[in-house]
Structure formats: C-alpha cells, structure tokens
Image (cartoon, rainbow, N blue to C red):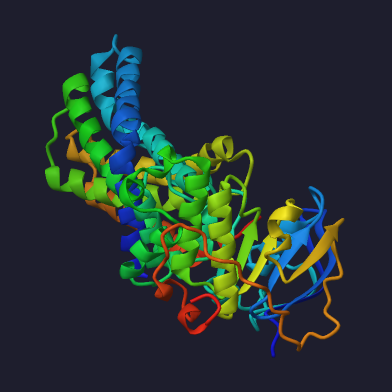
C-alpha cells in the first residue's frame, strides 16, 4: 500500500511540476480570494484582523477544491482511471498517494496564504507550533475528504458542480476547528488551541480511515 | 482446454438502460476474435464486462477462469484494455507513461524501452509529452503500455484508429505474436478490411447480443492463421512478449 502511495503521489507531483497548475493558477487564485476579502472588510480593519484565520481557511477551502478537481481531471481526461482500475495498485495506496499529492500542494499554498495574511491583514504569526501543527492536520483532513469525494463524483457528468456541493459541508468541521486553533495561535482568542487541534485530528483520522477503507468501492464505475 | 472467456446470457445495465441484453460468447486461449456491429451494438460494453469493469447484472461470466463479480481485482490485473481513449497522462512523456504502467503492474522498469521500441517509439519521441504527440503516436504509446503489462487477455476497442498503414501492420503483427504466445485477443472494429486477415473468428453484435458467439467445438484450438512477413519497422527484442521466442512462425 505505501509503495503504491509513493508511486501515485510521485506521478501526480511530477505532472504538477510540469503543468504548474497549482503554481500558476490555484496559487494566484487563492491570493486573489484573500485580496477580495481584504477589499470587502477594508473599512473595518480591526474586524479584518479578527477574521483573518477564518478568511485564510476559506481561501484554503476554495483552493483545495480546485486542487482536488485537478487531481481527478488528470485521471478522467483521457480515461487513465481505467488503467488504475486494471493495475495491481492497492486502492488504499491510490487514495493515500493522491491525498498526499493534493496535501503537498495545499501546504505550499498555505505558506503563500500565510504570507498573504501577514502582508494584507497585518496578522502576526505567533504560536508557530500550533499554527504548523493545525495546518498539517487540517491539510491531511481536507486532502483525504477531497480525494474521497472526488472519487465518488468521478463518474458523474455533473461532477464539477457537484463536488463543491458535496465537499463543503464535510469540510465545515475542519474549517471551523482550524479557524479556532489559528485564532488562539494568533493571539486573537484565549481558548485552548490544542483542544481544537485534537478535534481536527479526530476528523482527519476519520476522513483518512474512511478513504482507505472505501476508495476501492468509490473508484468503481457507477 | 479451458475457455479464456465464457459468457452466457450476460446482462449489463447503465442505470436502467441495457448495455448488454443476454450476450453469449466463447473465446479460446490464443484466439483472436473480432467483434463487429453498428454503433451502440454493445461492443465496448462487452469489452468492459470482460475486463471486469462493468457489473454483470444477470447471466454467467467466466473470464480467465475467474468470475468478474467475485474476483474482479485478480481478473483486472491480467487484462489489458485499450478503449476509445488512450489512458495517457498528457504531461508525462511517452516513456514516463509506459514506466508508470509498468510499475503499476509490478513489472520491471527494464522492460519499458523494449515495449516502446516494439511499437516503433524511440529516439526523440520517447521524451515528448503525450499531449504533443499525434493521435497515432498516442495510440502506440497506449499499446506500449499494454505490452509492458503482459496481459493474458487483450481487449481492444478500435485499435487501428489513428494508425497509418505501417503501424497498423505492426499492430497486427504484435497481436498475432501475443496470440501465438497463448494470450487471448478480443477486438472491436468497424473496419472489416483491417481485421479480416487478423482474426481467427468474427462475431456480430446487435442490440446488446452476440450472434454466433458460442462455439460448437470449444475444446478445439483456434484455426491456424498465416502470419505475413514482418513490416520493415525495427524488430522488437523477442522477450518483449513472453513466449514469443518459442513460436517459430513469429520469432
């Protein structure tokens, strides 16, 4: 399973390295989203600072949807998904590999967006350990749920519009918990950020386990 | 001799729409069978049922001795399917596409150059991204990915589409070789002329059913076909297709 995951992740990241869709399209899109949030709250700068963690994670959510869509467009564009189904690859390995590739791209985007909220919203990135830990765990959860739901909608003609509809509610707990953890880490809230991290970990574990167990069935033709 | 494919009254559905409406088919090991029929007759669906990719809603199916509904994963790993689309990643080169297919099939990466050469893909072509290849070149890359997988059952949907005369002849030679080595080949084709000399047997599909698909003498080996001289393209190393070297007529 792990060998298969490495193979699939390597393939997806190699393709991304050549196509540079995340770098040239998803990244700029995420920054534009942050900018638009900034324009929307420009008259109320204290509110913008308070809302920065939520805006950050909303931008991650939007970018994540694009990254997941892109990940499965690779497989469906020329029918490569049949090759995966006919291969000796473990479905769980395919799932983990695709989730890892999406997660790696999201982590890069998050670093870009973190710089964005410092520059645009004047946020101060204190609490680095909590910030980094919650970003890592949230990214794992977003990637796992995204890949599982993308596989679920893969065979449908309306997948481009259905995927955000399916995925947004599933990711709501992660966006909520990650936002709260970041609010604590950025000194905007006095709560226990590590408890929010624990909640994030629970959701990420559920989505990862669900994907590992169900991906074979999700990849079947509907 | 066990049949490679034995389908009886197979029904397959897409939602409530019938893809196959009671298809019967026998195919012997080492046989090349061509499926003919008009658009929508069910040729592609029949290939996908044999690959274990489409659920059999009713009837009996045994492919390579396995029930596609029970042992789908075991079956799929022994099947090569070339559909209407080539299954390539546009941003990977021809070589990288075939290498990924090899590694996903647990085949050694050393077999990749020979598979590419077998389809006349060498030199500069192997390092060109698939997106920049012509339709015929993409088809050949997809075929090289099948060669490297070494399937026991080759399922091909309009495999000659996009190929020029030279590479059609090369494909025909390849299919004769794999059949002579014991693999089974089922191909769907509209082009009677392109497959007439290649196939041991042709069956006709219509309305999701197969006419003449059941063999009267299923234990008889397929009738011998005369193998024409190899085309002038670079000869492939014989070890590309297992067992080919042992077949005097094609080695």
Vertical position of residue A60 compared to residue B6: above or below: above
Question: In the visual, does B151 lie left or right of A45?
Answer: right
Percent coordinates x, y for residue B100 in the rendering: 38, 59
Percent coordinates x, y for residue A42 in the rendering: 29, 11
Name the residue: 63% across, 67% down.
Answer: B51
Vertical position of residue B207 compared to residue A38: above or below: below
Q: Nearer the viewer, residue B211 or A9?
A: B211
Q: Is residue A3 visible?
A: yes
Q: Is residue A99 visible?
A: no
User: Quick one: quadrant of the C terminus of chain A?
Assistant: bottom right
Percent coordinates x, y for residue A94 in the rendering: 42, 61
Q: Nearer the viewer, residue A50 or B28?
A: B28
Name the residue: 58% across, 44% down.
Answer: B162
Which image quadrant is residue B23 in? bottom right
Name the residue: 28% across, 13% down.
Answer: A44
Vertical position of residue A158 compared to residue A132: above or below: above
| Residue found farthest to the top | A43
Percent coordinates x, y for residue B115 in the rendering: 41, 64
């Amino acid at each position: 399973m792990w060998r298969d995951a490495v193979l699939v992740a390597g393939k997806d990241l190699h393709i991304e390295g050549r196509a540079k869709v995340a770098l040239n399209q998803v990244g700029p899109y995420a920054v534009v989203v942050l900018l638009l949030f900034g324009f929307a709250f420009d008259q109320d700068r204290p509110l913008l600072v308070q809302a920065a963690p939520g805006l950050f994670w909303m931008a991650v959510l939007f970018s994540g949807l694009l990254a997941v869509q892109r990940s499965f467009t690779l497989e469906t564009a020329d029918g490569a998904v049949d090759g995966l189904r006919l291969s000796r690859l473990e479905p769980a390995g395919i799932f983990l590999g695709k989730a890892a590739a999406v997660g790696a791209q999201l982590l890069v985007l998050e670093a870009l967006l973190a710089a964005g909220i410092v520059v645009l919203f004047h946020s101060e990135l204190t609490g680095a350990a909590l910030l980094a830990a919650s970003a890592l765990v949230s990214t794992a959860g977003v990637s796992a749920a995204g890949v599982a739901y993308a596989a679920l909608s893969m065979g449908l003609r309306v997948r481009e519009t259905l995927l955000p509809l399916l995925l947004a509610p599933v990711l709501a707990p992660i966006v909520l918990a990650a936002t709260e953890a970041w609010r604590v880490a950025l000194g905007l809230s006095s709560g226990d950020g590590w408890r929010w991290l624990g909640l994030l970990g629970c959701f990420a574990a559920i989505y990862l386990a669900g994907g590992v167990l169900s991906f074979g069935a999700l990849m079947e033709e509907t | 001799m066990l049949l490679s494919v034995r389908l009886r009254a197979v029904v397959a559905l897409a939602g409530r729409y019938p893809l196959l409406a009671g298809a019967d088919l026998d195919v012997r090991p080492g046989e090349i069978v061509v499926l003919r029929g008009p658009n929508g007759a069910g040729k592609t669906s029949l290939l996908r049922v044999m690959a274990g990719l489409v659920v059999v809603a009713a009837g009996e199916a045994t492919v390579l001795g396995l029930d596609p509904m029970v042992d789908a994963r075991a079956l799929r790993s022994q099947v090569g399917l070339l559909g209407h689309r080539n299954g390539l990643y546009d941003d990977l080169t021809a070589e990288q596409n075939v290498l990924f297919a090899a590694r996903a099939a647990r085949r050694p990466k050393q077999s990749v150059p020979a598979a590419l050469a077998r389809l006349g893909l060498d030199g500069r072509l192997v390092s060109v991204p698939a997106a920049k290849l012509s339709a015929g070149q993409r088809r050949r890359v997809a075929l090289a990915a099948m060669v490297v997988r070494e399937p026991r059952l080759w399922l091909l949907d309009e495999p000659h589409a996009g190929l020029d005369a030279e590479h059609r002849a090369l494909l025909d030679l390849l299919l004769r070789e794999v059949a002579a080595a014991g693999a089974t080949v089922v191909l769907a084709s509209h082009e009677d002329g392109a497959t007439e000399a290649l196939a041991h047997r042709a069956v006709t599909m219509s309305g999701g059913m197969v006419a003449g698909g059941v063999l009267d003498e299923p234990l008889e080996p397929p009738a011998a076909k005369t193998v024409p001289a190899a085309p002038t393209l670079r000869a492939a190393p014989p070890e590309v297709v297992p067992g080919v070297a042992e077949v005097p007529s094609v080695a």
